[in-house]
Amino acid sequence: MGRMRGLAIAAAALAAAGGAAFAAPDCQMLQVGELPVSLDGGMITVAVQVNGKPARMIVDTGSETTLIFRESAKVLGLKPHRVENIEFYGVGGETDGGVVRVKELRVAQFVATDQDLIVTGEHALGDTVGLLGSAFLMQADVEFDLADKTIRFFEPKNCVGDQVVYWGKAYSVAPMIALPTRDVHVTMALNGASIVAEMDSGSSNTIVTVGGAAKAGVTPRSSGVIAAGASLGMGAKAEQTFEAVFPTFSFGDETIKNARLQIADLFEADKEVELGSHIAASVIDNAPQMLLGADFLKAHRVYIARGQKKVYISYTGGPVFEAPQRPPATSTAAPPPAVPASR
C-alpha cells in the first residue's frame, strides 16, 4: 500500500520513451527511464499530475513510501480514510496517517492508476504535495545528474565495477550497507571515524546526528559550535540544529577539509515506551548517523549501483555543503585521479 507498484520501471515499455544504451566492452548500460527534475529552494522536485491536477513532489530517497501531505490532500480534493494504529516516524517525531485512492498519478512518462497512497505529515513542505519515495526510485540502478537536472534509471548488462561510471570522469566509491528496505546507506568517514550515512535527496542540507558528530569528536558544547536555528521534517517537533567545522569528511577517496556541517538530534523524537518498561527506545531500525542531502548531490554526479552494493560519485565543482546562515564549505580539490571505465 502506497508503494507505487503501478509506476514500475519496465525496460520494454520505456524503450519507446527515449531509453538509450551506453556501451563499453562487454558492458551495456541500458537506460530504462529518466525523470526531469528541478532544484527548488534547495529541494529536488519533479512535476506530477494527481487526478489530472498539476503539482510537484519532492524526490526523496530517504522515504521508503511515496505519499501525499495531509494539507495537500485537501487542496487536491482528496479525502483520505483514517488508518488506526499506524504511525509514521521521521525527523520531528511521529505523525499519524490515512490512505487515499488516487485514480491516476503521472510522473514524467510513468503512469499509475487506482493507487492507494499514504496521506500523512504535520505540514506541507514548500509548495510540494508529497514525496516520491525510494520504493519507486530504487527499482533499478539510479544516476543523479543534477547539473543536467535529470535522474536516470539503468539496468546494466555484463558490467563490472567502475564500468558503470560511463561518463569517464574521476570518481570515488563507497560501499552500501545491506538493508531490508530500499534505503541507501553507505559507509564513510568523518574526522577519521567510520560513519553510516544515508543518501537522502529529500533533505535540502547534509546533516550529522548528535551521535554521529560525537563519534567524530564533536558535541553541541564543543568549542566553535554555534546554534543554527530549528529544522522541520514530517513530524510536529522542530529540532534544534547546530553548526560545526569538521576537519575532514571522506567519501571513499574524496576528502573535503574543514567541512561546515549541521548537527541535529534528528531522531530524538522517534521514541516510545513499551509496556513494562520506563525506558524510551528508538522505533527506527537502522537509523543513520548522517543524511547526505541535496546539497551533496548537486555537487556530484552520483550513480547508485544497487546490484554492486556501491555508490560512485564524481565531484562536479561548486559548494558541497550548504549550511544555513554561513558560507558553504567547498571541496579543497576535485577527487583524486582514478582510472575511468574503459569503453
Image (cartoon, rainbow, N blue to C red):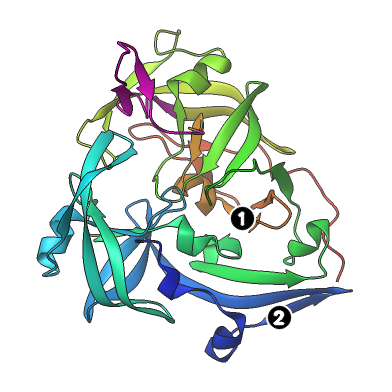
Which residue is painted at 30% across and 58% down in the image? 67
Q: What element carries label 1?
A: strand
Q: In this view, does 142 lie to the left or right of 341?
A: left
Q: Where is residue 175, by image quadrant? A: top right
In percent of width and height, residue 187 lies at 65, 35
Range shown magenta = 262-286
Relative vertical location of residue 218 with respect to residue 318 in this rendering, above or below: above
Q: Is mark 2 on a helix, strand or loop?
A: strand
Relative vertical location of residue 69 with respect to residue 21 in this rendering, above or below: above
In percent of width and height, residue 31 lies at 64, 76
Which badge, 2 or 1, is on the more N-terminal residue? Answer: 2
At label 1, counting other C-alpha atoms closer than 10 Å, the crowd grade (few under 14, some 14-19, many 20 or more) is many
Which residue is painted at 32% across and 53% down in the image? 41
Q: Can residue 205 be seen from the camera position used here?
A: yes
In percent of width and height, residue 330 lies at 55, 38
Q: Mark 2 points at which residue?
A: 21
Is-magenta flag for residue 247? no
Q: Is residue 128 left or right of residue 184?
A: left
In percent of width and height, residue 60 lies at 41, 54
Q: Is residue 312 left or right of residue 105?
A: right
Residue type (three-letter) at the residue carrying disc 1: Val
Judge by depth and name the residue closer to the eye, 23 or 171: 23
Q: Name the residue under label 1.
A: 302
